[in-house]
Image: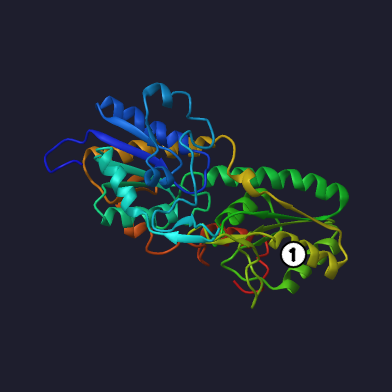
């Protein structure tokens, strides 16, 4: 590992958590400048799984050429590879959770790394902080379509997900108006409503339901009935997977103990559509976008942001400013301590400008008070 006064020579990069558009752009943004500075770059396979199991390959310029617009990640990823929450099956078929962080440190040292660049969201940054405390030199790059990482104005991948949601709502508008239906579209976001808020606002949804604002069923029914009475014979409802009714709970699709956060959300869209149909008499359909929001090429905005993040991350490594995460502040790329990024989850607040704009143009959030 790099000692005081010695130059950084070997750096590794991994993509943790769920995939999203822009990951390859970051890898390219890291590797090309690193090679120009004479650094050796290792790509760790399948996120933290590869760090624990010792899977990595050297990345050359030819490996990162032509990947700017390619979705996913050339390195592979995993959201079940937390070294501190490692699932292992015993001889009886039972899953036990182990701590294999020492294996991660062993491979980091065995590869003679001077630094590790970890690309990921909230979970990845929490792991990075723990590994940093164990002695690894880590720089973080904020990635999540959910945009719920604090200390950065935006995470890359979010704009691409919002684009998919917007296009989907545009398409639902035409079929909804043709058949005079209520269309419910369920989108990702986990416990944050950023995707639903931005996608719903851009797509012209009539109702947006987000986790931060528990909704009243009656307010939803009143909105679609009112629109129907005014001759607007269709409505679009954009609902975040983590949305929940007043005094109710989030709809959980399944639980997977192999994940650090075992809860898999899903099903609120179907429930909303069912209740609207039964309580208003209006024909209602639902669509779940699911992993479509993670796939495909990144938007131009995400390609640029990812490239900026990647080049800023390798710059921090070269300057040996470890334990930090690159961040977008306004129009500038800054860096913050990793612990600042994970101190709290970034959620939609009542004073958010997009929320206020949505209310101003008549979009309902399923409540009378905001």
User: What quarter of the picture does the N terminus occupy?
Assistant: top left
- Residue 331 visible in image: no
Q: Position of residue 120 (x, y in %)?
A: 43, 48
> Residue under circle 1?
271
Please name whichever residue, 276 or 43, is drawn nearer the observer in this view of the structure: 43
The residue sitting at the bottom extreme is 247
Indicate left or right for 226 with 268 as reference. right
Q: Position of residue 182 (x, y in %)?
A: 80, 57
Q: Position of residue 22 (x, y in %)?
A: 49, 38
Indicate left or right for 33 with 259 as reference. left
Indicate left or right for 205 with 329 as reference. right
The residue that appears at 66% across and 72% down in the rendered structure is: 245
* SS under mark 1: helix
User: What quarter of the picture does the C terminus occupy?
Assistant: bottom right
Tell me the quarter of the picture where residue 206 sits: bottom right
Please name whichever residue, 264 or 362, is drawn nearer the observer in this view of the structure: 264
What count of labels does the image hold? 1
Q: Position of residue 82 (x, y in %)?
A: 43, 54
């Amino acid at each position: 590992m790099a000692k005081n006064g010695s130059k950084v020579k070997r750096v590794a990069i991994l993509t943790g958590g769920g995939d999203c558009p822009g990951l390859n752009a970051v890898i390219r943004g890291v590797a090309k400048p690193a090679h120009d500075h004479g650094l050796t770059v290792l790509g760790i396979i399948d996120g933290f799984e590869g760090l624990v199991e010792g899977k990595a390959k050297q990345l050359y310029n030819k490996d990162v050429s032509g990947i700017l617009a390619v979705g996913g990640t050339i390195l592979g990823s995993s959201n079940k590879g937390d070294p501190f929450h490692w699932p292992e099956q015993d001889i009886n078929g039972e899953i036990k959770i182990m701590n294999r962080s020492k294996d991660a440190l062993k491979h980091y040292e065995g590869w003679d790394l001077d630094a590790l660049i970890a690309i990921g969201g909230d979970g990845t940054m929490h792991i990075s902080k723990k590994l940093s405390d164990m002695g690894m030199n880590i720089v973080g790059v904020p990635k999540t379509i959910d945009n719920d990482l604090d200390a950065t104005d935006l995470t890359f991948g979010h704009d691409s997900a919002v684009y998919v949601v917007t296009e989907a709502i545009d398409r639902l508008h035409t079929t909804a108006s043709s058949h005079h239906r209520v269309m419910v579209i369920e989108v990702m976001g986990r416990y944050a409503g950023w995707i639903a808020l931005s996608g719903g606002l851009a797509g012209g949804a009539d109702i947006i339901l987000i986790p931060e604002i528990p909704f009243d069923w009656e307010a939803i029914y009143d909105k679609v009935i009112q629109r129907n009475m005014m001759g607007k014979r269709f409505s679009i409802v954009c609902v975040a997977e983590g949305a929940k009714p007043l005094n109710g709970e989030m709809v959980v699709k399944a639980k997977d103990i192999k994940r650090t956060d075992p809860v898999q959300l899903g099903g609120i869209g179907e429930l909303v559509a069912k209740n609207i149909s039964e309580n208003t008499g209006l024909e209602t359909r639902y669509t779940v976008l699911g992993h479509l929001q993670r796939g495909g090429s990144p938007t131009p905005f995400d390609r640029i942001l990812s490239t900026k993040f990647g080049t800023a991350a390798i710059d921090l490594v070269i300057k040996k400013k470890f334990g930090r995460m690159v961040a977008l502040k306004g129009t500038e790329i800054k860096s913050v301590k990793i612990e600042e990024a994970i101190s709290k989850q970034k959620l939609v607040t009542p004073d958010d400008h997009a929320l206020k704009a949505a209310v101003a143009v008549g979009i309902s959030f399923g409540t009378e008070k905001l």
